[in-house]
Amino acid sequence: MKSLYISSLLVLGACSSYTSNFSPDITSEDIKAHISYLASDSLKGRDTGSLGEALASHYIIERFKEAQLEPLGTEGRFIQEFDVVKGYEEGPTGSSILTEHESFSSDTDSILAWAGAATASAKGKLVIAGYGINAPDLKYNDINPKIKGNVVLIMRFGPEGDSNPHTAFGFHWSLDKKVKNLIEAGAIGVIISEAPLYTTEGLNMDYKRGKARTSIPVVQVSAEIGAKLAKDYAGVDLEAYQKDINKNKKSVFKASSKEIEIKTDVQERTVIAKNIAGIIKGKKEGLGAIVVGAHYDHLGMGGSNSLSGSKTPQIHNGADDNASGTAGVLELADYFSEHRMDHDLIFLTFSGEEMGLLGSDFFVNNPTYPLENMRAMINMDMIGRLNNRNLLIFGTGSANAWDSLITKANTDQLEIKQVPDGTGASDHTSFYNKNVSVLHYFTDTHSDYHRPSDDTEFINTMGEKMVLDHVARVIEDLDTKTTEEFYFTEAPVTQKRSVTMSGTTLGVLPDYGYRGEGMRITGTSEGRPGEKAGLKNGDVIVQLGSKKLKDIYDYMDALNQFKKGDTSTVHILRDGKAMELSVQF
């Protein structure tokens, strides 16, 4: 972490690629200048916690200072820091396998801890359990009772190949499911071997956000090491063994009397992310604040959220998503520094949005300005592709007077579609869930979304100016409204908010930044089973029916035991207190 900080200072000190001659008016020229810097290749996609994001945060802070905003972060700074888990990595002692005659180490051999493994060791007899699949629908089951108390060797993928996850067995490829099944069967350790007949992309510690760690050591090995262990311990030719299973689609279990010891050392790989917060104090005291916000992080070099289809890392500059919204915050800060309102105006840029609204969620749970004094929050996410004057504004049902304010401000004859829902896949959701009235400005998605082609050249800067002019007029009008004239209302739900499932659901919105055991929620969908059962924002679901939950993936598995009309219980922690609620699906 220290090396990243020092590198940031060196780069920032040398950075002179942007101008500071910005107008106090909202101009297309300034919009282009902001986006050109924020979406430049030199920032490498502004991934959360990266050096590129640090450069972006420095740029935003410098613009806030020039606009004479006061810091509203922590400790008198513009910055509010928070930790983000970006993945897992091996700890200092790494991973190892110790047999009767030799040892393998991640320092020297093709072995690597599995990302979900515990930091632990296990010693026991080695058994071989095929692919580790339990598929009753296919009359196939590798989960043998003799697994209990032993270390288990399994292969990746399944009997129908490794290239098509949509085969009958493809549903059962998930290592999370395999390891979970083995743990439930009593395995004390797991060795995941590359399958000899299938191609491999190499061992990795891919991170699945929201996934809980297991309680046992789990190590990955190459096909060569897997074959050697199978031969030495059970006299099994692993390639012939795999061919037999694939041909007959029948499980073959092999046991040995020899002991093996495996060790894994796994630690979280965390980064420090930064929200940036500034304030322009109002001309009158005690009126509260209007919040203007946007996320400034993006996808970095791609990763699992990229839609590019390429396995080669590429810079995702995110000009529209969301350098455009960040530029909007900067332009409005400049404008209102010269046109002060009676209300306080708060300007926020969030990190971690692409990972699940992490920055805005952290801010509303650790506010640097009283939430109860926030009159409204206006969010801008992807406002740089205005086409035929078509503008979407979400959250219009979250206050009694939004409709009239939006209509009155539309002097540029924009074709505005209003969506009442106060929630969605952007940072306004975090504020709405705290009963703050919200708007979300959006010029709609496009074919460059989450792709390397989302670049500055495609930004409609004149169109974005029209969007920002509309936002400014809404703020100016809202500034004149009393609490009797403008107040929070619960918005109807028109967007899908819950975890996507094909069958039954509770209709809840998970908190993807939660790192404890269970699944914490940030809201419920109106009229859905969770709301009817009495679930509330902040509840941690620890058990659903007979199924105890470690994470969101256990929740999704637990739902499979129910069908529409079933009744059950949901066990939760609310403010640290255990509660049991009745639910009907």
Image (tube, rainbow, N blue to C red):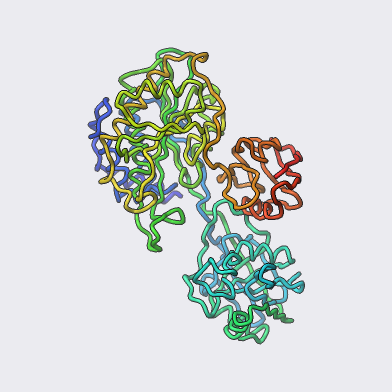
Q: Nearer the viewer, residue 212 or 62?
A: 212
Q: Which residue is rendered at x = 44% and y = 47% of the image?
A: 48
Asked whether, in this view, residue 580 is left or right of residue 482, the answer is: right
Residue 374 at x, y = what percent? 50, 23
Q: Which residue is rendered at x = 25% and y = 30% of the image?
A: 27
Q: Quadrant where the C terminus lies?
A: top right
Q: Which residue is rendered at x = 49% and y = 71% of the image?
A: 163
Residue 575 at x, y = what percent? 69, 35
Q: Nearer the viewer, residue 192 or 506?
A: 506
Q: Nearer the viewer, residue 21 or 418?
A: 418
Residue 576, quarter of the rendered image: top right
Asked whether, in this view, residue 101 is left or right of residue 37, the answer is: right
Residue 340 can be seen, yes or no: yes
Residue 77 at x, y = what percent? 43, 31
Q: Nearer the viewer, residue 501 or 353?
A: 501
Asked whether, in this view, residue 198 is left or right of residue 326, the answer is: right
Residue 279, quarter of the rendered image: top left
Residue 189 can be seen, yes or no: no
Q: Which residue is rendered at x = 46% and y = 13% of the image?
A: 285
Vertical placement of residue 432 versus 134, above or below: above
